[in-house]
Each structure stands twice: as structure tokens, then as C-alpha cells.
Amino acid sequence: MDQNHPYKKLRIPKDAPFELRPSPGKGWGVFAIRPIQRGELILKEKPLFVVSRGHGMRFDYEIEKEMSAAFKKLSAFDKQQYFCLRKNGSTEKFKRIVDAFVENDFSIGSGTDSGLFLLQSRFNHSCIPNTKIPTQTDGTVARYATKDISRGEELTFCYDPSFKFKNRQDRHEYLEHSCNCIACDISTPYQKLSDMRRTFMRGLQYLTNGVDLDCRKHGPQEDLTTPLFLDLSYKRKAENFRVRLSTRLIAGLLTIAMLEEEGLLDDLMLQRMQPALKVAGWFKTKSNVAIVKRVMKQSTWAGKFNESLWLWNRDDSADEEVMVGMKAYQAYSALNMRV
Ligand SMILES: C[S@@+](CC[C@H](N)C(=O)[O-])C[C@H]1O[C@@H](n2cnc3c(N)ncnc32)[C@H](O)[C@@H]1O
């Protein structure tokens, strides 16, 4: 019966390392048909058509009009492909063309355009995924393996990058469907540990950036309901950029070590964490520089973090310069965001 499902008619590249089939509890999903190596390109796809979202300034009816016009220009074959789309893999068709678009689009370019991707949108969500889509500038969406994947394993990705620093409850408030990955399955001790790690990492991000994930400072209410700091004096220091270099490096290394422990440290993640590592080159006090050298020589992230604890509570002669620089950078970024 699955052989007659409309998804079986979707055109898949000949050399693709995956197939589409039902994924219990999730509709249909994408599964590896051979071992896939970490870093391997899994699928590079062009959009069927693109609609401009114009910085979110456009009305829905304008987008709908543009979408219908783009759809009409498709070849008969592409229209047929589009009509294969089903509500979460069921046999139920979408009632309106625009609904299928909204459920299966990806933002592309600088984020102001949305493209309809027939295959990329078949991948289900996991909070501990095994694939990722780095930012593309050529209008396509390319997906890479972030882990070694075995034959038969489901290929997943995380629907929201901020999830890595959110606990289960916060993730599930956002998700419109369930998720049963090991970070969400409350029947395992792993889940509790995962929540602890992600909440801790969120606090470390606040300490480093002076703001929460949504770029806002927490008010007194959030300090009570979503406490990220036990000692609010640290929070105030973070918000005023009065955080020592030593604290910044320790926080960065601890975050990377915990991301690794959580199964989220891939090459792209490490690239994103580069600012935290850059800090290592900013120390000026001789004795600190010697410790940092030792830290960076350690072969594991946990080892680097352990060694960095020798820096705990130590001032550095570059502290003041860095604090002023960070404050100016934050003010500059905020100004640019407003423009
Ligand atoms: C873009 S589709 C993904 C492919 C979809 N499963 C299908 O059959 O076409 C997104 C939808 O898949 C389902 N889904 C994705 N990840 C899931 C998960 N981890 N658990 C349960 N449902 C999931 C949800 O219904 C979600 O709205």
C-alpha cells in the first residue's frame, strides 16, 4: 500500500543516499539506504518556486497572490510533483495550494525569500539531529550529515537552532507536534541530564552576551520564573559587560564540552562557537597567557575546560579594554539592527 503513496512519485536524485517511507508517529520520513559519513552532502535541492516575504512586511494575501502566479508558471510535471504533497504524510490532500506551500517552505537567501522544497521538507525534526543545513547564498538548500549515519537510520534535523539552549518544556511549547528523541523522552535519565545541560548552556550564553536567546535582558519576573542565575550579581555584570576574560573563556569551553556531551557538537557548531574561542588570544597578563597555552594544548574539550579552571577568578590586564570593546560592539550591533 505504501508503494502507491503519492510520496513514492516524488523525484529523488539517482545517487541519493536515502529513501522516503513511513516513520511511526511522525507521518513519513527520510531514511538512509547506505551508511553516510559525517560531513557528507546528503541532498542539494533547488526550490520548485520562490516567493518574496519582504522582511515580513508583506500581507498574507500579497504572498498568496505571488505564490499562485509562481505556481501557474510551473511545468505540468512540476505541478504534479507539487500535488503529491500530503498533510504530514497522510493521504489527506491540502485544501488550498497555499497551505501546502506554508507547510513545506524554507527561507532562503538572506531570509527574505521562501522557496518550496519538495524533498528537504520531508525530513522530520529531532532535538539531537544527524543532519544540518548551513546557510546557502545560491538559492539552493544543501543538507549535510553531522554524524556518521548507519543504513536504515532516520535522517533528521532540528527545526529551530535556538533549541540547543532550551529545555524540553520550552522546546515543546514551540513545536506543533510531539518529539520523542532521547532529549525529549521523559522515561530516561538522559532527558533530565539533557535539560540540565541545555539550561546551563543558556545561562552561559547570557553570561557571555549580556542578553537571552531572543536578545532581550530578563526582567525580575523572568528571574523568578526562568532563573538562569542563582547569583544575580553575575547577571548584572553580564548585562553591563563587566565579565572578565577568564570567565568568558571558561564559559565558552564549558559550553563546547556540554554541546559535545549532548551530541550537538559538529563542525558547523564549532564554527559558530569560534567567537568564544577567539577570547583565548586576547589575554595579556603573562601568567594567564601561560595557562591559556596549556589549556589549548589539551586534546579534548572536557580537558580544555578542566585546565581552564586554573584561570578562575583571575583578572587580566586586557579585561578593561575587552569590556569597553564588547559594550561598543553591542551598541553598534543594536544600532544596525534598528536601521
Ligand atoms: C515538514 S513535515 C516533515 C515530513 C512529514 N513527516 C511528512 O510526512 O511529510 C513536518 C511535520 O512532520 C511531523 N513531524 C516532524 N518531526 C516530528 C517528530 N519528531 N515527531 C512527530 N511528528 C513530527 C509534524 O507533523 C510536522 O508538522
Image (cartoon, grey):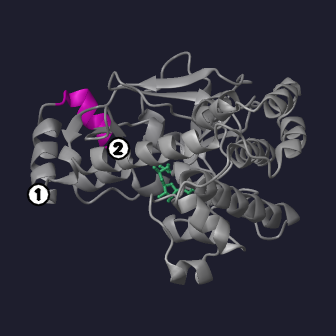
- CA separation, marks 1 and 2? 36 Å
Is residue 84 at least partly visible in the picture? yes
What residue appears at the point 9 percent right and 52 percent down from the top-left corner?
62
Badge 1 is on which residue?
Answer: 61
Does 103 appear above or below 332?
A: below
Task: Decide which of tag 1 and tag 2 comes sooner along the chain.
Answer: 1
Q: Position of residue 194 (x, y in %)?
A: 77, 59
Q: Position of residue 266 (x, y in %)?
A: 68, 33
Q: Position of residue 129 (x, y in %)?
A: 65, 44
Helix, strand or loop under label 2: helix
Q: In this rendered view, identify the residue nearer to me: 213 or 82.
A: 213
**Region rendered in magenta:** 74-83
Can you tell me whether the CB of the residue at mark 1 lies under 8 Å from the nearest atom of ligand 1?
A: no
Amino acid type at mark 2: Tyr
Q: Using residue 60 as the reference point, say whether residue 175 is left or right of it.
A: right
Q: Residues within 10 Å of mark 2 (few under 14, many from 20)?
A: few
Does 132 appear above or below 243?
A: above
Does 193 appear above or below 78?
A: below
Could you tell me how many numbered marks the image carries? 2
What residue appears at the point 63 percent right and 20 percent down from the top-left corner?
40
Badge 2 is on which residue?
Answer: 332
Amino acid type at mark 1: Tyr
What residue appears at the point 20 percent right and 40 percent down from the top-left corner?
51
Which callout, 1 or 2, points to the residue nearer the camera?
A: 2
Q: Would you say residue 21 sits in the magenta stretch?
A: no
